[in-house]
Amino acid sequence: MARVLKSIVLGGLALAALPAVAMAADIPPPPVYYTPPPPVEVPTNWYFRLDVGVKDYRPPSITFDAPTLGYSVPGAGEFINEDISTTGVIGFGIGRDFGAFRADVTLDYEWPGRIEGRLYCVGCPNDPVDQYSWEFADLSVWSLLFNGYIDFGSRGGPITPYIGAGIGVATLRTSNVTFENPNGTTGEWEGMRTWNLAWALMAGASFEVTQRLSLDVNYRFVHLGTAMAMTTLDGGTPIVYSNISAHEFRVGFRVGIGR
């Protein structure tokens, strides 16, 4: 009898609990709020660059070949003590970063450098001290180069060294072409503009300021070709300034644009 009463009591409790279980099943679960991760800034691919620097020219080779005036004699038409003064350079460019490799196109202008040299004065009155004239010209240059760079070190680190090379064209213009002979007579020749194949080798390092701004310090060796000036001697013989090249020490910025 006791066992029967116990079964009846447990069955009643189970029936009483059914409505509570049903009600609990009808309660919706608490809402889950999704918090997206913070956006990750992706480094830009395209960039603009601005560079300024000092241009230190190597001595050029200058010749003047006027056969009927006697300058065809070996050594007579070859200048001595050639030099081009140090000047400044400014450049602009746009490029793209592909990861460990970058490429850009740059347009550079240099302030005029002063060319000087000395030429044996054939036919001038003999001067027992000095038989060489002084020859001068101003040289200005525009160059357009297509450049490629390989970055080294840890990408994303504060300092990234690199090497690079470029090829393109340069236009060289001479002006204020003057001379002074040993006897004190002076004159002026006509300047000219020439176009040449140009190339450059460079090495440097970039210093990350922000993800979109880098300071760039670099060295560049650039070969610019040949310049000329026209004289009226011997039917119009040019002065030829060849092997014009320079060392450049530059500093600038690269600024990311777009994405």
Image: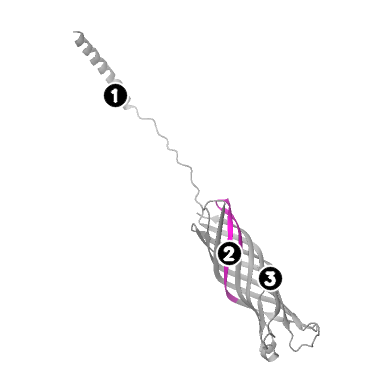
Q: Height in image: 91 above or below 119?
A: above
Residue 162, percent across and down? 55, 59
SS label for mark 1: helix
Q: How far apart are marks 1 and 3 (CA)?
A: 94 Å
Residue 28, percent across and down? 35, 29
Q: In the visual, does 197 lie left or right of 128?
A: left
Q: Earlier in the sequence, mark 1 or mark 2?
A: 1
Q: In the visual, does 234 lie left or right of 167?
A: right
Q: Which residue is labeled 3 in the image? A: 112
Residue 209, percent across and down? 59, 51
Q: Which residue is labeled 2 in the image? A: 202
Residue occupying image coordinates x 26% and y 15%: 13
Q: Distance between the residues labelled 2 and 3?
A: 22 Å
Camera-near label (1 vs 2) is 2
Please say whether residue 218 is one of the residues in the magenta stretch: yes
Q: Which of marks 1 and 3 is nearer the N terminus?
A: 1
Amino acid at circle 2: Met
Which residues make up the magenta segment?
195-219
Please say whether residue 74 is one of the residues in the magenta stretch: no
Amino acid at circle 1: Ala
Q: Height in image: 111 above or below 67?
A: above
Q: Which residue is labeled 1 in the image? A: 22
Q: Distance between the residues labelled 1 and 2?
A: 79 Å
Residue occupying image coordinates x 58% and y 57%: 205
Foreground pick, 133 / 142: 133
